[in-house]
Image: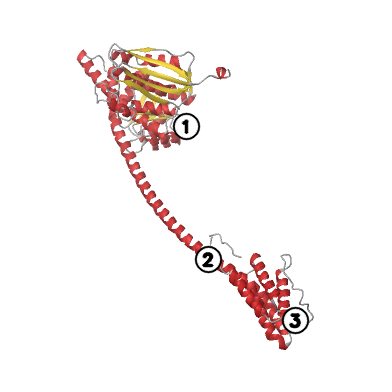
């Protein structure tokens, strides 16, 4: 019989013990000498139900009197049960000590040496299972120790990696904090004088300073327009930052598409006039709704329209349209400009991206990044199609919203 | 709603803001160059709204807001931060402090009065 330990190793010892057992049994004195009338035929075989200590004593007394292999097998079995029921070696030794002395003392003087030897044999045999367990345990322990060592090494390595990563993170956070602080200060230092400049210019435009002559008015227009541009740049920057940090709140309501688009076109009329471009409303399905933040979506429309207007040749229309497919509402703005240059197409939605640096066209270079962030926050998607010489169509898709009444159909 | 207490230490912005509020909104505007001055004169002026700059020499707007909040007479007066410090985390801080709203600098002078009126209405709704 071999026992396979969990680690797949064969625990030595069982075979050795059996051999030892057979050897001892062979050398044991021949049974036959009755001692105080106990029958040698009945070996008290321990069972789990019997109190182990009582069994031990009974079997010990029997073996001390009779000797023989059966008694030793009983001792071995007792040891096995002791191991199984977690009786320790010390406890077993105590039981043995408690009885063995008495047994030896009470034996007839001439048989005392035999009785004493048998008691020792019995005890030794009883300890054999402990020995087996112990050597198995030692092997297992060695394996575990080895495993522990490996685990400890891995743990140490992981801990070192963690410490390193944490250090880097702390460093990055510190840099980020410093960057935030610098941005905050720079932003404040730009915004403060701009407040006065823009405020004063707007008040002059409103006539607070009285009438200006034609040249003065033209100069004021220049100053005002450029101040406006700078203001838009800083407020776009803030918008984008709030969008990215998720700190901007969205007020979601059902919005009907057609009136919304008419309103957007109306709002861009003055700008279109300035560029000599007309904006028209194309096909729009009736009673089409989206659930959205109307102000934010208007911001997207303003961006798309101002881009389309800027890039359209004078006299050509910019067309706003809408359609609905698979419960997705698409709103598109089509211009008849030169199209987005091939090399620039993948940068269109990046921050500060402008196909050509153009002071005449103005714009912060943030409009499309903001539009993309808004549309995505609204659960939609933004994109464009373009063909050189045939203009560009920017579009975004938002989930259709159906009022409760029509949803029941 | 008639009376606005403007707490702002930049003289240029003082002028632009009070002109904008006066021309477009016909409000009575009391301008204070520091938070201390505002805390001293607020009781007599009895403002309907306080417009408060954040970055000021001496006591800053945040401490000023806390000081106003400690005074029962101003418990119901909306305080609007009007500031160039408008990073997302700063805006959150103003909100947590209990400001009624934030107007980012640079603001549009033509619509400032209307914005302030709307905030006041919302505050008392």
Q: Count residues near mark 3 (Cα–Cα under 10 Å), then give few for <14, some for 14-19, many for 20+.
A: few
Indicate the quadrant containing the C terminus of chain A: top left, top right, bottom left or bottom right: top right
Percent from the top left, x then y, of residue B21? 35, 22
Discs 1, 2: same chain? no
Nearer the observer, A351 or A267: A351
Tell me the quarter of the picture where residue A281 sits.
Answer: top left
Q: Is residue A199 left or right of residue A125?
A: left
Q: Dot 1: what SS? A: loop
Q: How far separated are the C-alphas under marks 3 and 1?
A: 110 Å
The residue that mark 2 highlights is: A139
The chain holding disc 3 is A
Percent from the top left, x then y, of residue B51? 38, 29
Percent from the top left, x then y, of residue B14? 31, 27
Nearer the observer, A163 or A79: A79
Nearer the observer, A263 or A102: A102
Tell me the quarter of the picture where residue B19 sits.
Answer: top left
The residue that mark 1 highlights is: B75
The chain holding disc 1 is B
Of badges 1 and 2, the one in the foreground is: 2
Q: Is residue A262 visible?
A: yes
Q: Which mark is residue A32?
A: 3
Q: Dot 3: what SS? A: loop
Q: Is residue B2 left or right of residue B10?
A: right
């Amino acid at each position: 019989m071999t026992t396979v330990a969990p680690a797949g190793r064969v625990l030595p010892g069982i075979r050795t013990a059996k051999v030892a057992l057979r050897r001892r049994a062979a050398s044991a004195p021949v049974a036959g000498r009755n001692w105080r009338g106990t029958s040698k035929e009945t070996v008290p075989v321990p069972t789990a139900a019997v109190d182990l200590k009582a069994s031990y004593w009974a079997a010990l007394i029997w073996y001390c009197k009779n000797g023989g292999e059966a008694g030793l097998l009983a001792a071995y079995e007792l040891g096995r049960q002791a191991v199984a029921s977690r009786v320790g070696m010390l406890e077993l030794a105590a039981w043995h000590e408690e009885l063995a002395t008495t047994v030896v003392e009470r034996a007839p003087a001439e048989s005392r040496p035999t009785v004493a030897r048998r008691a020792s044999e019995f005890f030794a045999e009883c300890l054999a299972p402990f020995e087996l367990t112990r050597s198995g345990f030692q092997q297992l322990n060695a394996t575990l120790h080895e495993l522990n060592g490996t685990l400890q090494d891995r743990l140490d390595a992981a801990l070192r990696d963690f410490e390193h990563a944490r250090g880097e993170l702390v460093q990055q956070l510190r840099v980020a904090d410093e960057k935030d602080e610098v941005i905050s200060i720079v932003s404040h230092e730009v915004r403060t004088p701009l407040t006065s400049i823009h405020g004063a210019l707007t008040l002059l435009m409103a006539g607070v300073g009285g009438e200006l002559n034609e040249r003065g008015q033209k100069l004021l227009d220049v100053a005002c327009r450029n101040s406006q541009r700078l203001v838009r740049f800083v407020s776009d920057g803030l918008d984008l930052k709030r969008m990215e940090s998720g700190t901007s709140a969205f007020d979601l309501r059902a919005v009907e598409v057609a009136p919304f688009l008419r309103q957007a076109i109306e709002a861009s009329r003055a700008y279109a006039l300035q560029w000599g471009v007309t904006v028209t409303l194309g096909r729009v399905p009736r009673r089409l709704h989206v659930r959205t933040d109307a102000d934010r979506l208007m911001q997207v429309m303003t961006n798309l329209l101002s881009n389309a207007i800027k890039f359209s040749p004078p006299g050509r229309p910019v067309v706003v349209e809408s359609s609905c497919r698979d419960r997705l509402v698409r709103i598109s703005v089509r211009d008849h400009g030169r199209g987005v240059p091939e090399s620039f197409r993948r940068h269109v939605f990046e921050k500060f991206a402008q196909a050509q640096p153009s002071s005449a066209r103005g714009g912060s270079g943030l409009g499309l990044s903001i539009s993309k962030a808004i549309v995505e926050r609204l659960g939609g998607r933004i994109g464009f199609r373009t063909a050189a010489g045939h203009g560009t169509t920017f579009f975004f898709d938002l989930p259709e919203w159906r009022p409760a009444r029509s949803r029941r159909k | 709603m008639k009376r606005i207490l403007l707490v702002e230490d930049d003289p240029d912005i003082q002028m632009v803001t009070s002109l904008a509020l006066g021309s477009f909104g016909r409000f009575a505007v009391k301008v204070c160059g520091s938070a201390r001055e505002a805390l001293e004169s607020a009781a007599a002026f009895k403002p309907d709204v306080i417009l408060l700059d954040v970055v000021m020499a001496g006591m800053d707007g945040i401490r000023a807001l806390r000081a106003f909040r400690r005074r029962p007479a101003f418990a119901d007066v909306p305080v609007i931060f009007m500031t160039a410090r408008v990073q997302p985390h700063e805006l959150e801080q103003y909100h947590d402090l209990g400001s009624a709203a934030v107007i980012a600098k640079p603001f549009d002078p033509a619509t400032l009065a209307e914005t302030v009126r709307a905030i006041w209405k919302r505050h008392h709704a």
